[in-house]
Image (cartoon, grey):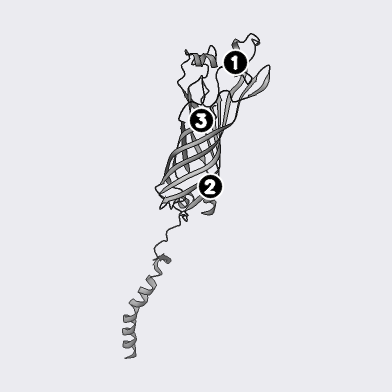
């Protein structure tokens, strides 16, 4: 009777023990070898590296501040000068549309944004951006032209001359560098639309204007016989520069561009400057470290 009772209890409780064991592991003996199978579903591995950071979220503030952004790109201009006209010939006697041709890949634009702020207008989707920075433009010329920092005291004096045509120029002179540098203090004012405001690496568009004031300009040349020479003057450049500004941000990449309202010269030459390039944001680097 006891054997029958034990057998019945074994039959009743055996499936319960099997179910309890199945939640942990299964065992199977094959040719004397025990195989253990884990019944738990594999846990998903946490995302690592870039894929973790790109989905990371940030706390949202009404006003956010960024320091030390740097733009690296190209400087150039659209030349609409009428070289047959009296203003152009007075500014640069004998000039034509080849005098001011630039070396495209050498003509650089570097902007140093000391501080920029963003003020949320509509739930961090629509924002107002403003800041303070330096806009540095370098135009490298193909021709050996020179800007005169001390033009004669007459009305509309000549400022630019072709060095190769001067009688005092040695025929063996070789130009290693010839550039015009125009540096501005700049204040941008833009509207920004952020499609993903809670993401550390967002998708956003910005557009607006930038107001610049010319604080330094110079013509720098390096020749085989004179060495390095710097001529510092305003050279008839407009002291104020008003430009359209725009930027596109895709994750960690920000592209920027600008186009001035009018010529960078007050008289003589009609050259409208523009820039484009890539923006480096130190905040992206620190965000990556914090979210590792």
Closer to the camera in the image, 123 or 212: 212
Instruction: Name the side, left or right, on which 129 lies relative to 157.
Output: left
Closer to the camera in the image, 108 or 55: 108
Q: Residue at x 38, y 74 (%)?
A: 20
* Residue on which disc 3 sits: 74
Residue 223's x, y, as percent? 65, 18
Residue 48 showing in the rendered view:
no
Q: Nearer the viewer, mark 1 or mark 2?
A: 1
Residue 42's x, y, as percent? 41, 61
Q: Residue at x 49, y 39 (%)?
A: 188
Above or below residue 2? Residue 242 is: above
Instruction: Name the side, left or right, on which 272 lies relative to 214.
Output: left
* Residue on which disc 2 sits: 66
* Residue on which disc 1 sits: 154
Q: Residues within 10 Å of mark 1 (few under 14, many from 20)?
A: few
Q: Residue at x 61, y 22 (%)?
A: 177
Q: Say which quadrant the N terminus sits in.
A: bottom left
Q: Nearer the viewer, mark 3 or mark 2?
A: 2
Q: Say which element carries label 1.
A: loop
Q: CA distance from mark 3 to mark 2?
A: 23 Å
Q: CA distance from mark 1 to mark 3?
A: 36 Å
Locate residue 80: give its quadrant.
top left
Say which label, 3 or 2, has the lower sequence index. 2
């Amino acid at each position: 009777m006891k054997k029958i009772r034990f057998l019945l209890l074994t039959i009743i409780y055996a499936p319960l023990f099997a179910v309890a064991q199945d939640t942990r592991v299964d065992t199977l003996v094959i040719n004397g070898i025990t195989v253990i199978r884990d019944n738990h579903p594999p846990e998903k591995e946490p995302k690592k590296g870039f894929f973790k950071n790109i989905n990371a979220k940030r706390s949202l503030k009404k006003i956010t501040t960024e320091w030390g952004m740097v733009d690296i790109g190209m400087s150039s201009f659209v030349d609409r000068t009428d070289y047959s006209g009296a203003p152009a010939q007075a500014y640069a006697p004998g000039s034509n549309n080849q005098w001011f041709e630039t070396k495209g890949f050498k003509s650089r634009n570097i902007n140093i944004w000391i501080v920029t702020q963003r003020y949320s207008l509509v739930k961090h989707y629509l924002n107002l951006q403003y800041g303070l920075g330096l806009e540095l433009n370098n135009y490298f010329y193909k021709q050996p032209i020179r800007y005169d920092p001390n033009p004669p005291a007459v009305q509309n004096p000549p400022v630019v001359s072709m060095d190769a045509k001067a009688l005092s120029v040695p025929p063996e002179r070789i130009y290693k560098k010839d550039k015009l540098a125009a540096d501005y203090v700049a204040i941008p004012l833009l509207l920004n639309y952020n499609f993903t405001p809670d993401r550390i690496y967002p998708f956003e568009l910005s557009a607006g204007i930038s107001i610049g004031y010319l604080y330094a300009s110079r013509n720098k040349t390096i020749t085989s016989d004179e060495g390095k020479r710097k001529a510092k003057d305003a050279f008839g450049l407009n002291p104020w520069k008003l430009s359209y500004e725009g930027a596109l941000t895709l994750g960690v990449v920000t592209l920027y561009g600008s186009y001035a309202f009018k010529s960078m010269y007050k008289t003589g030459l009609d050259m409208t400057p523009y820039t484009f390039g890539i923006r480096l944001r130190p905040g992206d680097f620190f965000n990556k470290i914090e979210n590792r």
